[in-house]
Image (cartoon, grey):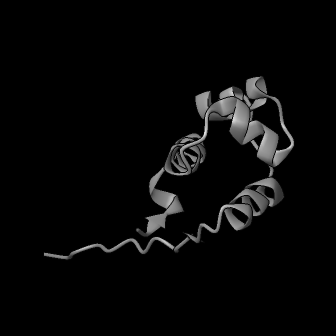
Amino acid sequence: MKVIANDYDPKYIIKFIRQATGLTQTEFGDKIGKCRNTVQSYELGRIKMSLNDFIDICNLFNFKITVEEKIKVTVKE
């Protein structure tokens, strides 16, 4: 499955990764060195995670996240 990061709020991507790995918030937090409350706050968008932490999580769970430039197309009539 390919997830284009620009199409989703980061909180949804973190939750997707956690759910895809079949881990609870506590188990996921243990794997990434954070407490359950921090994982919950990431998923609710209360706190933002750093890009480095995000990349580390993707690497840890072997997820490839693609960020693409959006091209705005205008049609002249």
Give the x, y percent position of residue 61: 66, 61
Could you tell me how many numbered marks the image carries? 0
Query: Which residue in the rendered view is the most extreme toward the left?
Result: 77
Q: Is residue 66 above or below residue 16?
A: below
Give the x, y percent position of residue 9: 53, 45
**Quarter-of-image position of residue 42:** top right
Name the residue at 70% across, 41% down. 28
Name the residue at 87% across, 43% down. 33
Give the x, y percent position of residue 77: 12, 75
Name the residue at 78% across, 47% down. 31
Q: Is residue 70 above or below residue 17?
A: below
Query: Which residue is at the front of the view, 9 or 17?
Result: 17
Q: Is residue 18 shown left or right of residue 72?
A: right
Query: Which residue in the rendered view is the most extreme toward the top?
Result: 37
Query: Which residue is at the front of the view, 26 or 66?
Result: 26
Give the x, y percent position of residue 26: 72, 30
Q: Is residue 63 shown left or right of residue 2?
A: right
| Quadrant of the frame with the N terminus | bottom left
Query: Which residue is at the front of the view, 22 or 71?
Result: 22
Query: Which residue is at the front of the view, 53 or 27?
Result: 27
Q: Is residue 32 above or below residue 44?
A: below
Name the residue at 66% across, 32% down. 25
Q: Is residue 8 above or below residue 27?
A: below
Q: Is residue 51 shown left or right of residue 68?
A: right
